Amino acid sequence: MHLETLAVHAGHDIDLATSAVTPPIHLSTTYARETTGAEHKGFLYSRYTNPNRAALESCLAALESGALAAAFSSGSAATMTLLQAIGPAHVILPDDAYFGSIRLAREIFGPWGMDVSTVDMTRLENVRAAMRPNTKLVWVETPSNPLLTIVDIAAVAAIAHQGGAACAVDNTWGTPVLQRPLDLGADISMHSTTKYLGGHSDVLGGALIFRQNDELAQRTLTIQSSGGAVPSPFECWLAMRGIRTMPLRVKAQTASASALAEFLASHPKVEAVHYPGLKKHAGHAIASRQMSGFGGMLSVQVGRSQQESMDIAGRLELFTYATSLGGTESLIENRASVEGPATRAPANLLRVSIGLEHIEDLKADFDEALGGR
Ligand SMILES: *Cc1c(COP(=O)(O)O)cnc(C)c1O
């Protein structure tokens, strides 16, 4: 079945008790059992699983053709749980991965014996050179945050597998609509469902989708249920509600982002536009191969300083100056100001998340804020 159909139907069963078409939210933390201990419907205690989380997880697995999926209370909780499952070993991350992912590996898991290398993954020889006998995980993030660097997922997965390591892809910006890491050979696809899957800036969540039900998947599930970094039934319900329209939203956001990127790239007051859909983008060829669209995120360098870029952002009327992405409203943010001294973002870089407003209104807003041509 096609993604649009799966987004509407996977994990959506008519409620047997009431025939409700829209699934109910099961807030109960505990479920009645036989005195023998046998469960009536497969549910025991809400941290282990519950009807809303089970539905979300089966939907997530279906979206990227995984064997199974695990839902978490945030994208970061998903990453944390996977790193816990990997344990004290060597892991490789891209040097421009989401700063929170690098911080988790380095600052939180470093003291527990995790050895962390960060490399520029656009050059495959860097990944090969970083592999060690105890490398257990190679983490990919593409397109990356905030420079939209593109990494060849199939090639990195092959290098990881050669060295006996698993390959995980942070697919938050790729979305299940535009990029399918498991089909490209990755073992795990990770999402901050807070972004495009939830899609309305109203629910935090994370997900890990596994290609195979292997030892690493089982260990992750054990940590998920015993560690308990899980979403509530209502949060699962909201994520499911968002997923139904995700394919349509992401396509519309991608079309607008492409048009805005072209518009800004030819604007005399713009220094640079980072968008993999632009032919001169360094990752354009690989992105064209491994994505079915270039996504709703772009970064733009404007003004001669961090402050000037922020002043331009402040003159925009339709783009709210706020962090996060993937919602229905357009957002903009100077990343260097958020990420601090360790940032790789240029000082005047503004990261833009395109919403569902009309593209002509978005273009006019930018033109106005830039002070015209
Ligand atoms: C937001 C984000 C995360 C973290 O997810 P949370 O839900 O905020 O914990 C991880 N990776 C990427 C690429 C993100 O954009």
Image (cartoon, rainbow, N blue to C red):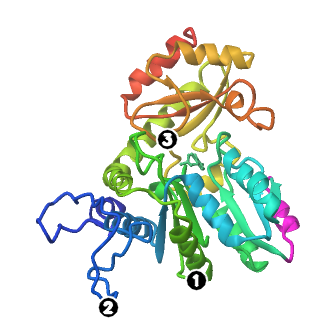
Q: What separation in Å lies between label 2 and label 1 (alpha carbons)?
A: 31 Å
Q: What is the x, y in percent for residue 42?
A: 33, 80
The N terminus - image quarter:
bottom left
Q: What is the x, y in percent for residue 64?
A: 46, 67
- Ligand 1: does it lie within 8 Å of the C-beta at label 3? no
Per the image, the residue denoted by label 1 is: 214
- Ligand 1: does it lie within 8 Å of the C-beta at label 2? no
Which mark, residue 296?
3
Q: What is the x, y in percent for residue 372?
A: 54, 9
Please tell me whether mark 2 sits on a helix, a strand or a loop.
loop
> Which label lies toward us, 1 or 3?
1
Relative to 280, is 124 on the left or the right?
Answer: right
- Answer above or below: position of 269 versus 82: above
Residue type marked 1: Asp
> Which label lies toward us, 2 or 1?
2
Q: Nearer the viewer, residue 216 or 154?
A: 216
